[in-house]
Structures are given as C-alpha cells and as structure tokens.
Amino acid sequence: MKKKMFIFCLILILSLSLVLTGCGGAKEEPKKEEPKKEEPKKAEPIVIKYTHGVDTNSPHHQTGEKFKELVEKYTNGQVEVKLFPNGQLGSEDRGFQDVQNNVVQATSMAVNNVTPFSPSMGFFDLPYIFSTREQFTKVIDTLWDDINAKMIAESGNRAIIWFDQDFRVLTTAKKPVEKIGDLKGLKIRVPSNPLMLGAFKAWGSDATPIAWDETFNALQQGVVDGQENPHSVNLASSFQEVQKYITEIHYKMWIGPVVMNEKFLQSLPADIRDAIIKAGKEAMVWERGYIAEKSAADLKALTDAGMVFLGVPEDEAVWQEKAMAIWPEFYETIGGTEMLEKVMKTLELEMPK
C-alpha cells in the first residue's frame, strides 16, 4: 500500500513538473507597437505682400514694420506680412493698380497717386484744407467709414491706414521767401498735379512740373530755383546740398494711405479680417507720434547742415486766401463736393463757392 502511494505521488510530482516547465518555457509573443499618431499639419500662413517705393528709413517703411508686427501678433502668426521697399515690386505710380489686381496685397503711396482711380480722394489735395495736423486727424477719425465707402465704390480698394509726413514746406536757393511777393520770378518744381500747380500759379510763381527722379539734378543745375516737400523728404533727398532757405507754408500736408483690395479682405475669415483692420488703425495712431518727432529731428538736421529756417510767411493769410479761391475750379476734378462738404462740416468751416 505504501509502495503504491509512493508511486502515485512520484507520478503526480513528475506531471506537475512537466506542466510547470511547459508554462515557464513558453516564449512570450513580442508586443506590437501601436502606430504613431501623425501630428496635424500646421496651416500655411496667409501672406500679405506689402510694397512701397522708398527706402527703409522712411515713414512708409516704419509704418509698414509696425503694421507687420501688429498683424502677426493679432492673428497669432496666421498672417505673414512681407515688406518690399524701394519699389522692388514696382513703382508707387502703379501700386494702386497692383493692389486692385491682387498682384500685391498692400501698398502705401501719396494720395495724388490714388485720385486717378478714386477722384473723391482729391479733396486731400485742396490747398489749405488743413491748417494743422490735428485737423487732418479729426477728419480721418470722424469720416473713416465715409472715406472708405467712397474709395471702395470708386476703385475696389480701401484704406487701412492714413498717415502723413507733416506739411510740405517750400525750399529755395536764390533768395529767401518771407512773403508772397518774394515768389515772383522764382521757378518752383511742383508735382504734375493740377491743384498744386494751381496754388503756386495763384501766388505768382512760375510753377514747373518735373518728374521726381529728375528733381535733384534740376535744382543742382538751376533749372528750377526751389521745390516743396516735407522735412523728412528734403533730408532723405539731400536737398540741403542744393537749397538754402526753408519757408514753412501750410498749404498742403503730405498725406497717403496704405490700401488693400476689398475683395481680398472680404475673402478672409472674419477674425483675420478684423485683426488686420485693427492692426492698421493702431499702426496709424503709432505713426502720428512717430512723425511728429521725426519731423522736428529732420528740420534740425537740415539747419545743422546749413539751411536757414525762415518760419511761417508774415502774410500767410494772403497765401491762404489766394489758394482757396481756386477751389471751385476743381470741384469737378475731385468727383464733386459730397465728400468735401462732409469734411468742411467736420472742421466747422465754410466751403469756398
């Protein structure tokens, strides 16, 4: 009996050993690696090509840099603004059309390069429409929507920034101009703009239209005796080398918009479009402070270089009266008086008739 029990126990132990050995020796199946989840591809940014015709030290470019900074901030990088200065993508003269055709998405220019496509913007060129920069700011801030409605209706483009380079001043070489009679006999280079030419002719000057890229040589060679531009332009153009006197006439501010195509803007998601418009308005406010400081610094640089600053003409009221007398001649040129009437109402001034 004991023997049988011993044999049974031995068989049981051996069986268990075999079972345990079989289990322990089984090779574990290698774990299959789960496929890695692909990161969602980041959307390509919307690119705004922003062009202008002057150098990187100009208010054009500095305003563009501020706009770029703010757009990219407010869109969290969903929009990239690429700046092309110095006419790399075309001249200022054709910039407005390039925006209309979406060749570029934004450009800045003097307002007289807008008026061939949006005649109602011609009110900005009327001599003495603004006597101070504050008046200009008030009109832009009050009539922002009215101005854009007109520009969009006439051209398909809208302004997202209106900036200025302060008032255009008169520079001369032969003699100082301290009163209107001193202009007699002087040839003054003026852009080929009927309103600007009309003002100088009304003052008794021999107003001479000359292309901008020929102006320095014309002054240097005595073809013309003077010209009119803001301090920033005069310094950047080295006019201190060929001009002596500065007379601070307030007949016209250098005014220009940054424009974008309205269809392009409306094609963007609403939050992106709103961010671009917000960035434009903030860049515009920034530029107002920037140009005030720059204008003063540039005048100092010109006088340090030997130019003589004569200040405001002693009879400026006469200049203003004669210049504003020509307004009615140009009401048709500026697309009628609808916008002008709103401007004069905003400024609480009477419109010449």
Image (cartoon, rainbow, N blue to C red):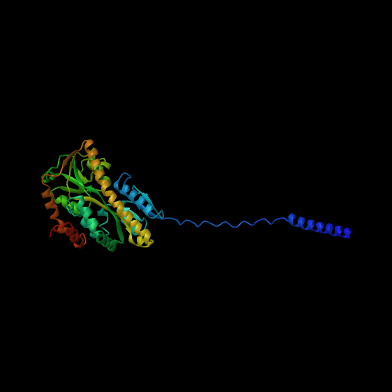
Residue 287 horizontal side relative to residue 42, left or right: left
Residue 124 horizontal side relative to residue 274, left or right: left
Count of picture labels: 0
Q: Residue at x 20, y 57 (%)?
A: 123
- For the question of whether residue 5 can be seen, the reply is yes
- For the question of whether residue 215 can be seen, the reply is no
Q: Looking at the rendering, which quadrant does residue 32 occupy?
A: bottom right
Q: Position of residue 285 (x, y in %)?
A: 28, 51
Q: Looking at the rendering, which quadrant does residue 259 occupy?
A: bottom left
In this view, the residue in front, 83 or 8, is: 8
The quarter of the image holding the C terminus is bottom left
Q: Position of residue 331 (x, y in %)?
A: 18, 60
Q: Is residue 30 above or below residue 249?
A: below
In this view, the residue in front, 93 or 336, is: 336
Q: Position of residue 270 (x, y in %)?
A: 37, 62
Residue 207 horizontal side relative to residue 96, left or right: left
Q: Is residue 188 above or below residue 326?
A: above
In this view, the residue in front, 239 or 163, is: 163
Residue 325 horizontal side relative to residue 191, left or right: left
Q: Position of residue 23 (x, y in %)?
A: 74, 57
The quarter of the image holding the N terminus is bottom right
